[in-house]
Amino acid sequence: MEYLTHLTAFIAGLGTGWSLKVIISNKRFNLSRKTVTRQDNNNVGGDMAAGDIHKK
């Protein structure tokens, strides 16, 4: 019977650790995907585009 409480505590600890890992990983992923781009005071004569632009 003593083994059952230890096994239950072990499984609960694994579940808690796994849940925290998933939460922390998702927060890090979301923070790394946020980029701030400032487009203030940009003076261009035509189009402001990076890469190829096709006008027809």
Image (cartoon, rainbow, N blue to C red):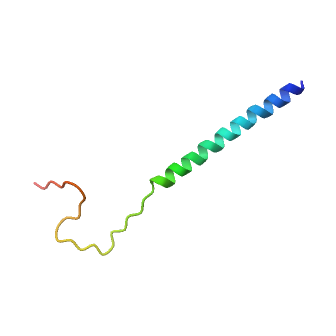
* Residue positioned most to the top: 1
Judge left or right: residue 19 versus residue 5.
Answer: left
Question: Which quarter of the rendering shows the C terminus?
Answer: bottom left
- Residue 39: x percent and y percent? 33, 69
44, above or below 28, in the image: below
Q: Residue at x 65, y 38 (%)?
A: 18
Judge left or right: residue 29 versus residue 22.
Answer: left
* Residue positioned most to the right: 1
- Residue 2: x percent and y percent? 89, 27
- Residue 32: x percent and y percent? 48, 53
> Quarter of the image holding residue 51?
bottom left
Judge left or right: residue 39 versus residue 19.
Answer: left
Disc count in the image?
0
Judge left or right: residue 23 versus residue 43.
Answer: right
- Residue 10: x percent and y percent? 77, 33
7, above or below 38, in the image: above
Q: Which residue is drawn at 62% across and 43% down?
A: 21
Q: Residue at x 80, y 34 (%)?
A: 9
Question: Which quarter of the rendering shows the N terminus?
Answer: top right
Q: Residue at x 69, y 36 (%)?
A: 15
> Quarter of the image holding residue 49?
bottom left
9, above or below 20, in the image: above
